[in-house]
Image (tube, helix red, strand yellow):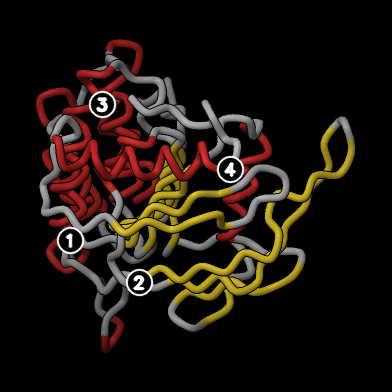
Amino acid sequence: MLRAGGRHSSATEELQVITPSKLAIENVSKSFRSTSGPVLALDRVSVNVAEAEFVCLGRCERMRQNDFAQYHRWLGKPDSGMVLADGKPVTGPGRERLVMFQEPALFPWLDVFGNVLFGLKLKPNLTNRDRREVAKYYLELVGLSRFQHANIHELSGGMKQRVSLARALAPNPRVLLMDEPFAALDALTREQLYGDIQEIWKARRKTIVFVTHNVREAACLGDRVLLFSPHPGRVQEEFVVNLPRPRDINSVDLAAHASRITKALKSVGQVGAVVAE
């Protein structure tokens, strides 16, 4: 970006850790139309997310995926209520807020490096050399430097998600929304990524909102876990996870937190609503 005096930013400046955003969702309601009629996805939801906080949203399994996807509208315009980022109204998508989806959604005609570079090409006031340096940094951060010229079809599921994460981080957003990014991966790959995402979050200081239906995953990653009810979506209960990091998903202490969350779901008739792997 341009600095004082119209100077272009360098890769070094672009890689600096920036102040993460704080979010305020105030009395937000959001509905949409489905083939079976109108659906109230969010009903008068109020949530505050602090700077650099890692908040997990517990997704009820009984909610259809396209219903829950409406939570992404937190980053857009609600039917009623207000979404604020650093005290300013959010009325649509922006470079400060990026999404990492459940599917990698990578471009198959580009190699690994090209996919990470793609978003940087849309960021103004960086030279091509600086863009390449930034892309290389994030590929190294996610452990894929050796595979930067690999084709997408040559990658495993876990490697594809690492590319997706590097692509989301490369434009240096202040907020990262992650929509069940590890749900389709095998258990061993997920466990490795749990450690990696905690280290990356610590290094880059992003505000992260992480959607999941896996209780242990939520307890492993989140500073807080918010449980949502299905149809309409309301904050059902909040849990603070005050375990030290990095966290091991197989630890006894973490299992105790996950057990508390699961019991809360069962107490309101949500048996089997989430996965407690």
**Near-viewer residue (157 or 198):** 198
Which is in the foreground here, disc 1 or disc 3? 3
Disc 2 secondary structure class: loop
In the rendered image, which quarter contains the C terminus? top left
Query: Which amino acid, mark 2?
Result: Ala
How far apart marks 1 and 3 lie (CA) works out to 27 Å
**CA–CA distance in space, label 2 to label 3:** 26 Å
| Most distant residue in the top direction | 154
Side (left or right) of 107 relative to 269: left
| Disc 1 residue crowd, few under 14, some 14–19, many 20+, Cα 10 Å | some
Q: Which residue is mark 1?
A: 15
Residue 64: quarter of image: top right
First of labels 1, 2 by sequence position = 1
In the rendered structure, the answer to whether residue 185 lies left or right of residue 109 reads left
Read off the residue under disc 2: 50
Please state which of the two labelled residues, at mark 3 or mark 4, is closer to the viewer: 4
Taking the image as shown, residue 48 lies to the left or right of residue 206, namely right
Q: Residue furthest right?
A: 37
Percent coordinates x, y for residue 68 in the rendering: 61, 41
> Mark 2 near mark 3, Cβ–Cβ under 8 Å?
no
Cα distance between the residues tagged 1 and 4: 46 Å
Alpha carbon separation for disc pair 2 and 4: 28 Å
Amino acid type at mark 4: Val
Q: CA distance from mark 1 to mark 2?
A: 22 Å
Closer to the N terminus: mark 1 or mark 3? 1
Q: Position of residue 53 (x, y in %)?
A: 30, 63
Nearest-to-viewer mark from 1 and 4: 4
User: How many marks are shown on the rendered structure?
Assistant: 4
In the picture, the quarter occupied by the N terminus is: bottom left
Q: Earlier in the sequence, mark 2 or mark 3?
A: 2
For mark 4, give the secondary structure: loop
Image disc number at residue 268: 4
